[in-house]
Amino acid sequence: MPTFLLFDIDGTLLDTGGAGGASILDAAEAMFACSRRDLPPLMLAGATDGGVLRDLFSAVGKALTTEARAEFLQLYLGFLKRRLHAEDFAGRLLDGVPELLAQLSRDSQVHLGLLTGNVRAAAQLKLERFGIHPFFADGAFGDDADDRNHLGPFALRRMSQACGHELHPDEVILIGDTPKDIACAKAIGARCLAVATGQFSRSELELHAPWRCLENLADLNESTSLLSKNSMIR
Ligand SMILES: [Mg+2]
């Protein structure tokens, strides 16, 4: 039985060192001719880009039309690309991630995908910055829905197409760092491996009853034994 692993990005695979949030504020300043100091704090953990935009536009009293959304995202992606490649970029892959992806990708029964609130182009920029984009067959993105709980079916459909196998939720594990990732897994009847490498501690995540919870992905034996086909017993 194959296993389909759907990874969240920020706080799970990598930390942009603030470049992601800063780029959203850059775009807001450019689009609304305001100062970031006058904007409410961004609530990014587990959010979708669409949800963040909705909050931002509401805070400045602007209508989030299709055109405005496209214009904002274009600005955001330009700033994000610049910040990800700036000399003072302070981002990093989280502990154990490159080793885990390399190990899992050698298992023919394991298929790697994404389930992220990032719009697809932002996800690609972030993953390419660290050379890990090619590991992932496809997934669901912030372009697909503003509510993270609606992203699962997009990921299942695209991974089915990419891998030529009709996915059953029993075969799917989401890996994420927030209660919203856990809720998103439950929304499609999949398991969630929660990792305390973002803003939430292990005990905070465990309150939301994920399938499993780890401090981080640094222990390769521990993470691969949970995520590879040999660990399909619940
Ligand atoms: Mg995250």
Image (cartoon, rainbow, N blue to C red):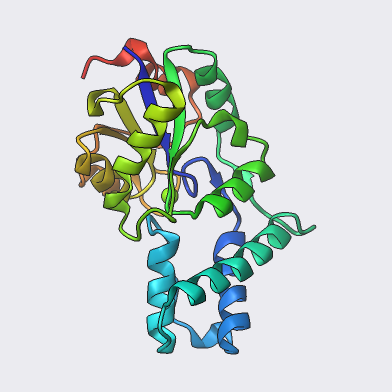
Q: Quadrant of residue 51?
A: bottom left
Q: Name the quadrant of the C terminus.
A: top left
Q: Quadrant of residue 20?
A: bottom right
Furthest residue to the right? 87
- On the image, the x and y values in percent for residue 191 come to 26, 32
Does residue 180 sit above or below 137 in this rendering?
below
Q: Residue sitting at 54 percent across and 85 percent down?
A: 37
Left or right of residue 91, residue 164 in this image? left
Question: Is any part of residue 232 visible from this angle?
Answer: yes
Q: Nearer the viewer, residue 17 or 135?
A: 135
Question: Is any part of residue 203 visible from this angle?
Answer: no
Q: Residue sitting at 38 percent across and 73 percent down?
A: 54
Q: Quadrant of residue 132?
A: top right
Q: Residue sitting at 19 percent across and 35 percent down?
A: 189
Left or right of residue 157, residue 127 in this image? right
- On the image, the x and y values in percent for residue 74 come to 61, 67
Left or right of residue 204, residue 43 in this image? right
Q: Nearer the viewer, residue 69 or 122?
A: 69
- On the image, the x and y values in percent for residue 205 come to 28, 46
Q: Name the quadrant of the N terminus.
A: top left
Does residue 162 sit above or below 77 in this rendering?
above
- On the image, the x and y values in percent for residue 174 come to 34, 35
Q: Residue sitting at 41 percent across and 29 percent down?
A: 161
